[in-house]
Image (cartoon, rainbow, N blue to C red):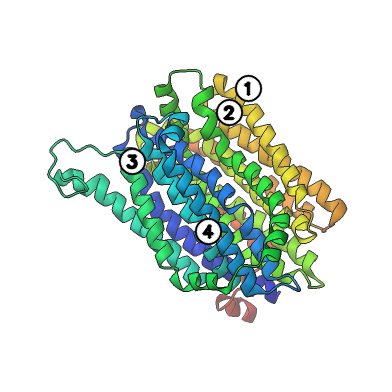
Amino acid sequence: MANLKSLAKDTAIYGLSSIVARFVNYLLVPIQTAKFNAEGGQYGVITNVYAYTALLIIILTYGMETTFFRFMNKEGEAPEKVYSTTLRMVGATSLVFCAVVIAFRQQIAALMGYGDHPEYVWVLFVTVAIDAFSAILFAYLRCMHKPVKFATLKIVNILLNVTLNILYLIILPALHVNPFGIYDEQLRPDVAWIFYINLFCTVATLLMLYKELRGIGKGFDSGICRRMLSYAWPILVMGLAGQLNQCASQIIFPYLYNGTPQEAGVQLGIYGACIKIAMIMVMITQAFRFAYEPFVFGKSKDSDNRSTYAIAMKYYVIFTLLAFLVVMGYIDALRYIIGRSYWEGLKVVPIVMAAEIMFGVFFNLSFWYKLTDRTIWGAWFSGIGCVTLITIDVLLIPHFGYMACAWAGFAAYGISMLVSYFVGQRYYPISYPIASIMSYVALAVVLFAAISWSNAKLPMPATLALNTLFIIVFAAVIVRRDFPLASLPVVGRYFRKK
């Protein structure tokens, strides 16, 4: 129980920082979707290019985050050497990547369909290379159980990003002054400057990690390097396949959409804006992952580890289902996060959120092959999901547009989750409380149906009131069955006395 409390505390800190950062980052969505109207297609450019960077961060870290945690807690390995070696490996590959991108920026931009704007490509690609190197520094903070510093730096990065976006998209146009301080009566925001701002914030964050950078001076161990690469390459394949499940649709959509490039940009922009609302589930999964990875590897030698993993899975599902119901219950209010011209795509939100829940379950299941050094299985599971997603995209995007993207992700995560569970039970059996978990899923489905009816039939005030009641019902079941108030700190004292 003490271990679970530690996990809960770290998850809460990571989660709070992630919530705050994501909430502040959400300010960019109404600003950008208001300044870049759906019909213009500029937000489609943002969605498309960021999809490439999401894939590149996996390539440039090549599984070293998870591998770093494994080797920092592995008997016979020197932690300081592991850290220094990892920094030098990822730093070297990031530098080479930057050099190649800058040298061939025009050709790369042309291949992506942005030949007239190479700055769209090279600025973000250099940014993602710096992010890849910084990822190891942030992994070190997690490994050393420094969630407060981790959270602070993440929040500062987002605050700086949002502040500069507000300056560029709102204040400077109102003053008719361009980013160089020169008066410009005809100033119109350009998406390229959104990417420049991102680069500036990434560099600033790296500089704030100067203390952690000192670890690079502990030398390079070629033996550790070989062992880590041997462990990491299946994770890289798994990560690529897994990330393709998240971003492949946005990358290939312009090539498959049955319409003009301009129409494709408009539709992709609508999809990209609407899934921002569904990102609350990504935020929860990410917060859990940040705390769970060092927790699992640190606890791998304990005798009760499997029962702890089973309980952790149950609570993950419970609270993600609650988050799902909250978002859907207040979707009439949350839709104002994005511009009105994007509202037609809101129907993808429940599909994408459900897919993210299954991805979180898949992530929880993944530790059986990481702990047993059978990481090749992860590559197979993610690969199966990736093939499923791309197949559905290719077949259905020409006919159903961005709705095909949402259902492709749902199918891909669902299949990966199921295959991982059944194979994992053979090699590393864990007695997950399936019956209890599925009872919560069934209740959530019933309440979601009621919320959907409410959203469709009632005026907004009545909808929000009734949906609040539905959410309270789910929360009451959680408290009664699995989260008794008497177990809570401070407040629990009152209930224990009663």
Instruction: Name the residue beneath numbered marker 2.
Output: 404
CA distance for labels 4 and 3: 26 Å
Q: Would you say 318 lies left or right of 324 here?
A: right
Question: Hey, what amino acid is under mark 1?
Answer: Leu
Give above or below for 286 relative to 264. Answer: below
Observer-side mark, 2 or 4, equals 4
Q: Earlier in the sequence, mark 2 or mark 4?
A: 4
Q: Is label 1 in contact with label 2 (beta carbons under 8 Å)? A: yes
Secondary structure beneath disc 2?
Answer: helix
Question: Hey, what amino acid is under mark 4?
Answer: Gly
Q: Earlier in the sequence, mark 1 or mark 3?
A: 3
Instruction: Name the residue beneath numbered marker 4.
Output: 91
Q: Earlier in the sequence, mark 3 or mark 2?
A: 3
Q: Is label 4 in contact with label 1 (beta carbons under 8 Å)? A: no
Residue under the image location 67 percent in, 64 percent down: 222
CA distance for labels 3 and 2: 29 Å
Residue under the image location 33 percent in, 39 percent down: 191
Observer-side mark, 4 or 1, equals 4
Q: Position of residue 402 (x, y in %)?
A: 52, 29
Instruction: Name the residue beneath numbered marker 3.
Output: 192
Instruction: Name the residue beneath numbered marker 1.
Output: 395
